[in-house]
Image (tube, rainbow, N blue to C red):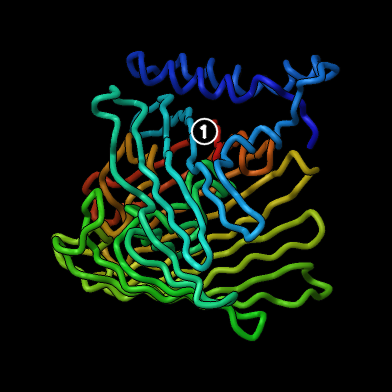
Amino acid sequence: MAYQTSIYPTIILQTITSKIVNRPFKRTSFAALILFLNTPFIAQAEETKPDIISIEEAWRFTDIYDNAQGDYIKLSGRLQLDAAWVNSDQGKFNDTLWRRFRFGFKGKKNNFSFDLEADINLNNQLSDAYNRLTDANIGLAVNKHTKILFLKQSAGFTLDGKTSSKKTLTPERNNLTNNLWFTAEYFTGISITSTFWDDFSYKAGVFASDGSDEISITDASYFTLFTISKKLVNTRLWDEGEISIDYVYNDNHDDANTKDFSQIVSSSSKFSLGNWGLQNDISWAAGDLNQSNVFGLVVMPTYMQNEAIQWVTRYTYINSAQANGISLNRYENSVLSDRGDQYQEVYGGVNWFFNAHKLKLQTGIQYAKMDDAALDGGKYRGWGFSLALRSYW
């Protein structure tokens, strides 16, 4: 992409600053979003000026230090803005809000690396904006194939659970992930990732299920995570392919910051052929405490129209063995927080990439329904529309 801009970083700064120093805003955020996204096109008319830089080059502001040996220090973070509308038989919801703002640093020195990032709620006043630490870890590269990570880090599993919010293909993670994955995401622990036999890789970790906002292992029990993946050689059916299996054992109890499942198994895959793509997830979880067993699947075809436009569709199915084992997704849950036993969703949307995943606009429409065999308030049927800005550095 070759959009030209010299004022893009200024728009980012102005948008963030206006949010912090003024009261939380709703609809005015949408206007800021439109201005933000039109910045490259406004500046494109000035591309004859000698100080113009490309939108890709604007991301170089993150570089603080680097050397010929590959050591570096960089800024890190993400900025995400949502506008969501829900219209269902059970009620309506609409809001525009800052979804995520994270800011920090990452670096590398010889075989050691570090990540330190804070989650900040821009919907609150500045004095109450800090939420928690997300990444707060130290890494050791044992060799070119193996790395060990210590302290607070992402513990991702299922198709969307192990995909960073920076690179998800829909504004919301699929509801199978939201029901099974531990949505707190960042836990204190130790993990090892490694590749072997070229086509195989694995990740194994042990984490405290402590719900502390910082680094802590004292207030809960533990869970283990093991993932094995294999990249597939190209065939007539796909140019690139990868399959993976996640297994989680959760020593659950009432104080844990995890879902009420004792074991979770997820098999996911990603394939691409030309401009077409297909991602899938089949998952099962053994209920614990008052939680029922849950089974579900996700099928998500994609099509890249060109380097800037991607079309995405998705079907999600979730079934609970007993009543009230399933919850709705984020914005649907704002209408109805009761639980059901069977959920289905159909989604269709489009992504516009201005600087790949580093700056994109996502929009989509979905139809979802949830059945409630217990007839205690969990039945849901409705439409949703979302518009989302996603940016990271």
Q: Is residue 229 visible?
A: yes
Local SS, label 1: strand
Q: Residue at x 53, y 60 (%)?
A: 298
Question: What residue does disc 1 label?
Answer: 386
Tell me: 313 left or right of 228. Answer: right
Please identify the quarter of the rendering in which residue 233 is found.
bottom right
Position above or below: 91 against 199: above
Residue 179 percent location from the top left of the image: 36, 57
Tell me: 44 left or right of 354. Answer: right
Image quarter where the N terminus lies is top right
Residue 28 percent location from the top left of the image: 46, 14
Q: Residue at x 42, y 35 (%)?
A: 101
Front position in the image: 299 or 102: 102
Residue 81 percent location from the top left of the image: 48, 30
Type of residue at label 1? Ser
Front position in the image: 197 or 310: 197
Q: Residue at x 31, y 60 (%)?
A: 187
Q: How many callouts does the rendering have?
A: 1
Front position in the image: 41 or 87: 41
Residue 318 percent location from the top left of the image: 42, 60
Q: Is residue 367 visible?
A: no
